[in-house]
Image (spheres, rainbow, N blue to C red):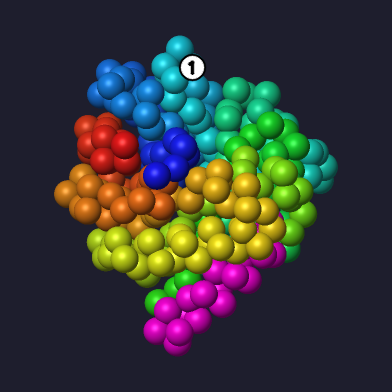
Amino acid sequence: MTNRTPICAANWKMHKTRPEAAAFAVALPPLVAGELERVEVWVCPPFTALATTTEALGEAAIRVAAQNMHFEDSGAFTGEVSAPMLAELGVDGAIVGHSERRQLFAETDEALARKVPAALAAGLVPILCVGETLEQREAGDTEATLRRQVEADLVDVADDDLERVVIAYEPVWAIGTGRNATSEQAVEAIEFIRALVAVRSDAAAEAIRIVYGGSVKPGNAADVLSPNGIDGALVGGASLDPNDFAAIVAACR
Ligand code: PGA
């Protein structure tokens, strides 16, 4: 058993207008009120709904993260948003390295090596996503892929700061496909990632939260997330409905 507080995060991706985000932010707190002492709940809206969501959540102990950020504080980077800008908005964290950013928007490990420390420097919690593609898994390259991503993306984070990062193990073949990893597959990958962190710091490996993401639904969450060592979930499709998401939060306990 560990003292790590589990995390359940809603990744809305490119969904929800401001009124839709506000309606969710008003509906969710009473649905998860009984869980908030045991589970850290996060909502990750698109940039345009961050302020609305933060305001609508009010005093509710639910955190808000962006879905991406740039590593520079400011500059000539058209279309980008920086960590200090997010912090100023009252945002608590940022997802970085999501596989959709890696695959569709050419996010690189070099950029992530700068994004993770930039988030920490601004006081944001980086939720760093890593995971292998189906081809990599079938070629037996799962561990090599995870090793490459974890080592590269955290290279400029001080050992003492590693525990402030949240890592999401998200096998690419399980995202949005309805095909979730088995709990054995998730545990195996998460234990491997934890061992990679332990190479840097045993204390950080003990403290860092590593969650699973990929087709987590109310119907499979208890099964997939129950083993020790899985510190919660990053949820895409099933996080758009407050009742579905609340059911998954309960399973993260
Ligand atoms: P999914 O997405 O739950 O829709 O598979 C997870 C994610 O992309 O974080």
The crowd level at tag 1 (other Cα within 10 Å; few <14, some 14-19, many 20+) is: some
For this view, does 174 lie left or right of residue 204? left
Residue 68 shows up from this direction: no
Give percent across and percent down for residue 87.
66, 28
**Is 218 covered by the magenta stretch?**
no
Near-viewer residue (73 or 216): 216
- Image height check: is 190 above or below 217? below
x and y, in percent, of residue 161 in the image = 70, 43
- The residue positioned farthest toward the bottom in the image shown: 139
Q: Residue furthest front?
A: 1
Q: Residue furthest top?
A: 59
Find disc 1 in the rendering and name its residue: 55
Residue in the image at 43% along x and 32% along y: 40
Amino acid beneath label 1: Glu
Provide the residue span drawn in magenta: 136-154
Classify residue 189 by image quadrant.
Answer: bottom left
Relative to residue 173, is residue 201 drawn left or right? right
Instruction: Quadrant for residue 144, please give it.
Output: bottom right
Query: Where does the image place residue 9, in percent across and percent down from the top left?
Result: 41, 40
Magenta stretch prevailing secondary structure: helix
Q: Is residue 64 above or below residue 128?
A: above
Report the residue that reaches farthest toward the right. Answer: 75
Q: Is residue 188 left or right of residue 35?
A: right
Q: Residue at x 82, y 42 (%)?
A: 75
Question: For the point 53% across and 24% down, which residue is it?
Answer: 51
